[in-house]
Amino acid sequence: MSDNGKLKLVLCWHMHQPEYRDLQSGEFKLPWTYLHVIKDYVDMAAHLEAVPQAKAVVNFAPILLEQIEEYARQVNGYLHDRISITDPLLAALVNPSIPADPEERMRLVKDCMRANRERQINRYPTFKRLIEMADWLEHHYDSLTYVNSQFISDILSWYHLIWMGETIKLTDTRIKRLIEKGSGYTLHDRIEIIEVIAEQLSSIICRYKALARKGQVELSVTPYAHPILPLLLDLNTTREAMPDAPLPELDVYPGGEERVLWHIEKGVHTFKRLFGFKPKGCWPSEGSISDQTLNILSDFGFDWTASGGSVLNNSLNLAENDNALGIHHPFKLQGTDIVCFFRDDGLSDLIGFEYSKWHADDAVGDLIRHLENIADHEPNDKVVSIIMDGENAWEYFPANGYHFLSALYQRLTGHPKIELTTFSECLENKAEIKPLARIVAGSWVYGTFSTWIGDADKNRGWDMLGDVKAAFDKVISTGRLTDQQVQQAEFQLAICEGSDWFWWFGDYNPGEAVSNFEKQFRLNLTNLYRLLGEEPPAYLALSFTQGSGTPAMGGAMRPGIDLYN
């Protein structure tokens, strides 16, 4: 290690989007994958490229990687051979004719309103005016007949311009010119925008691969479709951290361990295909761990995993763990060979929820003061893990976090007391590992599974998933499906098992997000029944959860510590 006296700091950014495709039609139902590529994944890579001494761990969900790959293929197919794009918003951007139907126009207008008002929309007065007109149109639907094609062309163009990463806005002359143009966008302009999008989609995986090759980034993986592993293994682990939580009618998820192994194997296979090597680390979906989960990850050969600080705190309260102290150490569960790092929830949540309201220099200064305090007052050989969403946080910062992230990497790399490192480097350099006799199962969110199970709507989702899994097992056992049909059904089942659907179920979330994800979940289940040759249950035609809440940061992120309990 370059200096054993330094505090070791690991910045771990988790990149994750669920499967937005209808796997049967191929249509992308929501545009968040390509929008986060051009805004966040591009910027996060560029910040590291700009400071070669900086280091980070970057974790990718495999279904995100596959969607990026598919978007790149489709957009390049459009540009080279005019093959149609299956994302409706991206297709509309380059459609020579603006739809005449008022409902279609209103749908496009509403799609172009989905952005952060303060940081993305209000930053550009011309786009702000368009959105104010769109707000008015929502309440005066009859007036849509008078909305001309230029309004639609301009709002589509502006929407994609505001979603460009700050590093693109600062360096790409085409984007600079188009932002300055402000109005009157032509089809030629819109095709220019999609050319920039194509370049980012085609190069982003290679950029992270290059950073990994240089040793600046350690790349890690999540199980394939981002399921909550402990719950697939045993729904009752919910009660380890929430003893009184109501559970679904489903007693056990059938064949859960087999499904967990499928997600891990498939996730590593996808990772190896795109990056060319097997990852040493696994960030289990949402940092969700249990004793059984850690045993499986250990048996699979991973060197390290990670979870939330609240999980460790809950575990340290157990009598059998009374010798272990402090969050700033890696730990190892007895009987396993895998090392588990734990998120400093306080520091991670400052970035996720507070620093976006601060001046960038003040925010970075405050974070460094906290780190210096740890370096000065805790024993040597400490590892501080800041683990957080690598995508949703930045839209709440001015300029997509550009000033904050630039200052963060620059000031940390020159700091005399702090060393940026990776989890694998910590292990290679013999970081002190503390023992744990047992883990209290939980996730990085509050140290529990409350975001995915334990209320009526989330539990209903589990019962629906249990129904389709029972149908899957029954049909597979008959042997009536071909190998190809079995494979299709397995993939569809994996998507249904993803954690994101359950994240959004519940009244405390925003109505539009709940509706979008709930519809997608029901569509996924329906598609699986049809692949199995079974009639979908009638309940899949009916909505089962609605939202009317206004959670912090739109509900796309959660703090690691529950401040209300």
Image (cartoon, rainbow, N blue to C red):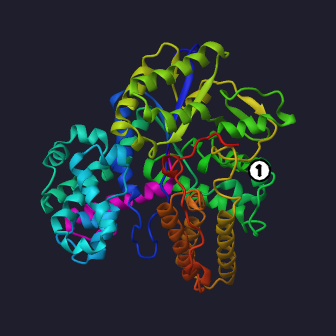
What is the quadrant of the C terminus in the image?
top right
Start and end of the magenta stretch?
59-86
Q: Is residue 23 above or below residue 455?
A: below
Q: In the picture provided, is 243 more to the left or to the right than 108? A: right
Q: Amino acid at mark 1?
A: Met
User: In the image shown, does 149 or 401 lie closer to the viewer?
Assistant: 149
User: In the image shown, does 137 or 537 lie closer to the viewer?
Assistant: 137
Q: Residue at x 55, y 65 (%)?
A: 495
User: In the image shown, does 545 or 450 lie closer to the viewer?
Assistant: 545
Q: Residue at x 66, y 36 (%)?
A: 309
In magenta segment, residue 31: no
Q: Main secondary structure of the magenta part?
A: helix
Disc 1 residue crowd, few under 14, some 14–19, many 20+, Cα 10 Å: some
Which residue lies under the disc numbered 1?
Answer: 242
In magenta segment, residue 61: yes
What is the quadrant of the N terminus in the image?
top right
Q: Residue at x 58, y 65 (%)?
A: 494
